[in-house]
Structures are given as structure tokens and as C-alpha cells.
Image (cartoon, rainbow, N blue to C red):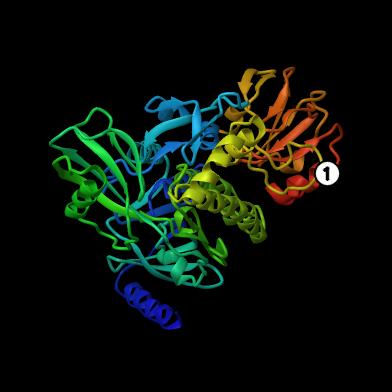
Amino acid sequence: MVAIRDNVAKGIDASIADREVRQHQVVIAGGGPTGMMLAGELALAGIDVAIVERRTSPDLVGARAGGLHSRTIEVLDQRGIADRFVSQGQAYPALRFHMIPLDISDFPTRHNYVLGLWQNQIEHILAGWVDELPVTVYREREVTGFVQDDTGVDIACSDGRSLRAEYLVGCDGGRSLVRKAAGIEFPGWDPTTSWLIAEAEFAEEPKWGFHQDAAGMHAIGKVDDTARARVVLSERQLHLDREPTLREVGEALVEVYGTDHGIHSPLWISRFTDMTRQAAAYRDRRVLLAGDAAHVHPPMGGQGLNIGVQDAVNLGWKLAQVVKRISPESLLDTYHAERHPVGARVLRNTMAQVALRRTDDRSEALADVVSGLLGLDEPRRNLAAEISGLGVRYDLGDGHPLIGRRMPDLDLATTDGPVRAFTLLHDARPVLINLGEPGSIEITPWADRVQLVDAKYDGVWELPVIGAIAAPAAVLVRPDGYVAWVGDPTPLGLADALTTWSGPPRAA
């Protein structure tokens, strides 16, 4: 690793000598959903941010991953862009654990559904949003190395050019070069099984839907209104090849269905495994990780894209405040502290789903028991809240049940008229909602950073799983939509919370 860094440093020095180095406050390696969401968050905060992306355009070949969970839709709603996605997708009232439907239509959220939307559509909509913001995108290049110092990061790119940034964020996938070059360990579990996945056309109509045999679960489904179909096949033996062929897919189809249905004209073919790993640290000084660069796991439940976007929303405002010298660098430590446990839980539940998919008698017996348990309300609600993201609670201290949890999107009454709570977060700024006597809370030393809104709400306060809670007198909501402080009913501790999450008070 030392030799690699030395070579990278020499390459950067040579590049600096050849041409001017472009400088940005933050550089993001990777322009997938996580990278684009993070870039948007930073741009909203006034940060000079750039994305380095190897693809020539934001158009992703093939459908890839699919589905947005409730909390992801909520964070998009917090930025005022959820309707762009909802209008293009299809709402389903249940998410799935293994093959077991978990109904979430009774969850207290405006988005109590899973939104069926393929990754290529998700990325296209996100790219349109990013295009509206001051984000620089360097296409057809990759980050090939970097060197950190006390004030920033020198970044080498595949086209021979160099960038300089105060911080570098690796959103460059499971084989992240940024993670490897930073020397961050990636412990976890090696793969035990693999699946082929393809999007192609068939000469004969295949057997649609799910099919199970001794090898596992298989599926063939139509891709929207096109002539293409999406195929997922469990392989009888573990394969680790990165680029499977159409012939392999055809042979696997024959093994499972007795025919390849005349498969032809593949749009893309890939293979995935149940390898499960998580970065030991989400940060090394001025280098951070988000999305698949920080955690990889089997795609059961469609959680990877979702927690990557939520990583970005947790990190963006914190990184912006540190770059703008509003908050100390220690604020970035809360990113790992809050998001690493969330990623660890996703790793565990996806591993459990892989175990339940095994076809031996003992695994099938376990699946029957789990299916029965998840038919009960309390287990169903708890697991569905975890997978949907609605049950996330950050450890921000004891007290009112709202602390550390998502702020409900309430219909508030203000002197300026009715407003939704999420609308107050469109600019990615913290907001203090005073539900008591108007003018009873004073935050002048933070007025340049925190919105203060006097409001009324007479309805029931309700949280997923927990249910109805006592109405607070005031709430401090972070830019990511999580409650950092509750007035219950006095403002005791408010100054400390404002200092922790919004920086020290401004001098008089």
C-alpha cells in the first residue's frame, strides 16, 4: 500500500507540472445514486462539489436494481423532488423479506408503500435534479489514486489530470478504489452462492414469474412494455467470474426450465453473489465512504441503493458545515457512528434472507416458522420498519421518543399559512419548530444557520412501530430530517443541541 501511494504521489506531481490542477471543496468518486444525491446535498449547502464518473452519460444500460423504500422517498420529499419519482413509478403496499410480503399500508407516513422504479429511471431523474444545481461533473474518467495532507487531498484521474479538494468521498461501488487506497479494511463474509442476471429478448414466450427447484429460486419477468425480459437464475455452483456470457445464461435456462426459450439480443448480463462486507471505518481523515463503497450485500429486499441514498443525506449537511467552518471536524465522526450500525443491520437481514432461500429441508422448515411469525403484527411492523428505513433511530440521547428518529411530515399551521414539515427542509437547512407560545424561543446566535418557525399542530403524533407519542412543545430537526432535540416543555438543553449540530453560537 505504501508503494502504491508513493507511485500515486509521483503521478500527481508530474500531472501538476504538466497542467493546472482544478480545485473543488469536495470531490465525489462515482456518479451513481449515492454520488448524485451527495452532490445535490452539498450543492444545496453552497459547496463547490464535483463528481468524477467513468460513464460517458447518466444513461444506465439496463434496468439494474429496482425500488425505492419509504424512508428514501421521504428524504427525496424533504428536498421537494419526490413527486418526480412517484409520478414515474408504481406503488406497492408491501415490501418483502425472503418471499414473505410485509404490508406497510398502515404505517404513519405519506409514503407507506414501495415504489417500483428501476435504477436506470432513478438515476435519470436524479441526474436531472443535479443538472439544476451548481455541480461539476467530469465524465469519462475515474479516480485512480490520491494523497492526503493536512489541508486536503490531491486526486489523480485516469485521463492524466489532477484535482485538489478539501475532502474526497468514495461512492465508487463495492470494488471501491478509494476505500482500497485509503487502506480501510473491508471485513465480512465470502460468497457462498451466485446468481446470473440478464436483460434480453426471447424467441419463445418463457414461463413468467418465480420458479423454485433444488438449486434455489429463479425468475423471469417482463421489462415494462418492451420486448425484453429480465432473468435471474440461481446457479448450482458458485461462480465468481465478473463477465458471464449469453451462452452461460442459455445453458442455465436449459438446466432450470428445460429450454433456453430462444434467448437472444442481450442488453446486459451480469452475475452477483451473496458476498457480504462492511468498511471497518466510513472515514479516514479527509476521505469518506458512502453507498456500496462502504457496504456490500446480496440484493434481497432492494436495500442497497436505498441505504446509499440515505448515507448521502446523513453525510452531506455535516460535510458542508465542516467545509464552511461552521462546525468542527469532529462532526464527521457522527457519520460513521450513525450510519455504520444501519449498514450492519442491512447486512444481517440480507444474510438471513439468503439462508432462508436454501432448499434443504432444515432451511425450508425455518422459512415456514419465520413466515408464521411475520404474519403477526408486531414482528411484521418491526422488520418492515427496519427494511423501509422508517424505524431508524440514531443514538442522540435519552428522553422523548422523537429524539434520534425521523420527524413526521405533519401539516403545520403557521402565521404564513399551512405548511408541511418536510417543506421546511427543502433547502437542506436545520429548522426549529416552536409549537408553544409564539416568540417564546430565542435562537439569535444561530439565526443565520437555523430556521425558527412558530407553528401549531392539533393532530396525533405517531411513529412507526411505537405508535402515538406525547406532543412536544418544540423540536429541532436536522437537515436530514432527524430530530436532535425536543422541548418537553422547556427549552432546557437547546443551546447544547444547537452547538452540537449547527456549530458554536455566533459572537455578539
Q: Could you tell whether 471 is left or right of 26 in the image?
A: right
Which residue occupies the extreme front position in the image? 361
Residue at the spot x=61%, y=34% of the render? 380
Q: Which residue is mark 1?
A: 493
Q: Quadrant of residue 23?
A: bottom left
Q: Quadrant of residue 65?
A: top left
- The percent position of residue 7, horizontal first and vertical second, equals 37, 80
- The percent position of residue 276, horizontal first and vertical second, equals 48, 58
Residue type at mark 1: give it: Gly
Q: Residues within 10 Å of mark 1 (few under 14, many from 20)?
A: few
Q: Quadrant of the N terminus?
A: bottom left
Judged from the image, the secondary structure of the residue bearing numbered disc 1 is loop
Q: Could you tell whether 442 is left or right of 280 in the image?
A: right
- The percent position of residue 24, horizontal first and vertical second, equals 44, 58
Q: Could you tell whether 41 is left or right of 15 in the image?
A: right
Q: Could you tell whether 195 is left or right of 448 in the image?
A: left
| Depth check, front residue: 20 or 83 | 83
Q: Does 469 appear above or below 416?
A: below
Residue 281 can be seen in this image: yes
Q: Does 199 appear above or below 150?
A: above
Residue 52 can be seen in this image: no
Residue at the spot x=33%, y=63% of the render? 240
- The percent position of residue 57, horizontal first and vertical second, equals 27, 47
Residue at the spot x=62%, y=56% of the render? 325
Residue at the spot x=23%, y=46% of the render? 253
